[in-house]
Every structure is written in structure tokens, then in C-alpha cells.
């Protein structure tokens, strides 16, 4: 008569962790490649107006941005405000901003700096006109308006 015996002592083999460090480095390099560092934190609401004729900027490193829109926090009011870098500013601060942007660039790039206006579509044109006048006084004649594609 045959007897069935349970074979004891079977164990599940352990997981091979030899390639674990390779996988971790692959993930690390992947996230380093796809991650971009945000330079400016928007403090204004920004829905750009739509336009049909759009051109991309050639060198984005030569662009300095001016943001205009309502503040995100309602405590700061409902009127459109100007944001330069990470702080709110007035129209009078624009000339100093342009000069500091020029000072931070190489001498060969100073003539190619473009000022991009990112303006909310609900902003009144008077604020934009004031900003344009200040840019003219500062000698920043290359102005770009940021829009989104549509009609």
C-alpha cells in the first residue's frame, strides 16, 4: 500500500535584490530628466486671450515676463495687479525691473531681450497701456503678448 507523504521543508525562494539599485537609479534619472523647475509662482489669475495668428518664441531664455491679472487671494482685492518675478509691483517698478533683467544677462544678449506680457483676458486695457508706456521709457521696445490658440 502506497503512502502519501507531505514533503516538508519547502520554502519559497527569496527575491533577488541584486538589481534593485539599478532600478532605483533608473527611476532617479528618469525623474531628473522630466522634472522642470518652476521659476515663478503665479500670484494672479491668468487666462490668456485667444488669438488665431500665433508664433512661438525662438529663445525663451531671452524673455522676461510681466504678469497682469486679478490676485488669486481675494483678500488682496479685485483690481488687476502687476506681478514681476514673485512679487506684486506697481507701474513705477517696471523700469527698475527691466534694468535688473538687462544687468543679469550677458552683454551680447542685452539687445535681444524680449518682454512678454502675460495678461488675463478680464484685465482692463488701461493697465496694459500704462505698462507699455513704462517699457517704452525703459527702452524695452520688443514686446510680446502671450495668448492661447483659438478664435
Image (tube, helix red, strand yellow):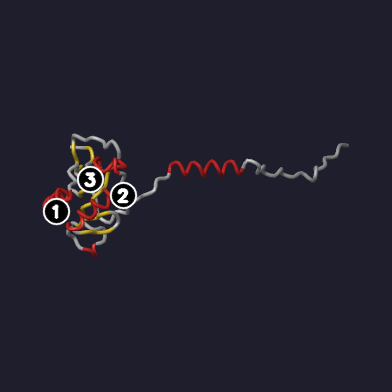
- The answer to whether marks 3 and 2 mark residues whose Cβ atoms lie closer than 8 Å is no
- The answer to whether residue 136 is left or right of residue 112 is left
Q: Classify mark 3: residues with Cα within 10 Å, few (<14), some (14-19) or many (20+).
A: many
C-alpha gap between disc 3 and disc 2: 14 Å
- The answer to whether residue 77 is left or right of residue 30 is left
C-alpha gap between disc 1 and disc 2: 26 Å
C-alpha gap between disc 1 and disc 3: 16 Å
Q: Earlier in the sequence, mark 3 or mark 2?
A: 2
Q: Residue at x 61, y 43 (%)?
A: 20
**Which of the pair 98/118 is nearer the observer?**
98
**Which of the pair 139/71 is nearer the observer?**
139
SS state under label 2: loop
- Which corner quadrant holds the C terminus? top left
Q: Residue at x 66, y 42 (%)?
A: 18
Q: Give the number of the disc on residue 115.
A: 3
Q: Residue at x 11, y 53 (%)?
A: 126
**Which of the pair 120/32 is nearer the observer?**
32
Q: Residue furthest right?
A: 1
SS state under label 3: strand
Residue 14 pos. (x, y %) = 70, 44
Q: Give the number of the disc on residue 16.
A: none
Q: Residue furthest front?
A: 107
The mark closer to the camera, 1 or 2, is 2
Which residue matches tag 1?
127
Which residue matches tag 2?
104
Q: Earlier in the sequence, mark 1 or mark 3?
A: 3
| Quadrant of residue 114 within the rendered picture | top left
Residue 77 pos. (x, y %) = 20, 63
Amino acid at each position: 500500500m502506497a503512502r502519501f507523504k507531505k514533503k516538508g521543508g519547502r520554502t519559497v525562494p527569496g527575491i533577488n535584490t541584486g538589481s534593485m539599485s539599478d532600478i532605483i537609479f533608473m527611476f532617479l534619472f528618469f525623474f531628473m530628466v522630466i522634472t522642470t523647475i518652476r521659476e515663478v509662482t503665479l500670484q494672479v489669475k491668468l487666462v490668456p486671450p485667444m488669438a488665431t495668428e500665433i508664433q512661438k518664441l525662438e529663445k525663451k531664455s531671452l524673455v522676461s515676463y510681466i504678469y497682469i491679472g486679478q490676485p488669486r487671494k481675494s483678500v488682496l482685492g479685485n483690481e488687476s495687479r502687476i506681478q514681476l518675478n514673485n512679487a506684486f509691483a506697481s507701474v513705477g517698478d517696471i523700469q527698475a525691473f527691466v534694468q535688473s533683467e538687462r544687468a543679469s544677462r550677458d552683454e551680447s544678449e542685452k539687445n535681444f531681450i524680449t518682454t512678454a506680457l502675460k495678461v488675463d483676458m478680464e484685465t482692463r486695457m488701461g493697465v496694459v497701456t500704462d505698462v507699455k508706456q513704462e517699457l517704452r521709457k525703459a527702452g524695452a521696445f520688443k514686446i510680446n503678448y502671450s495668448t492661447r490658440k483659438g478664435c
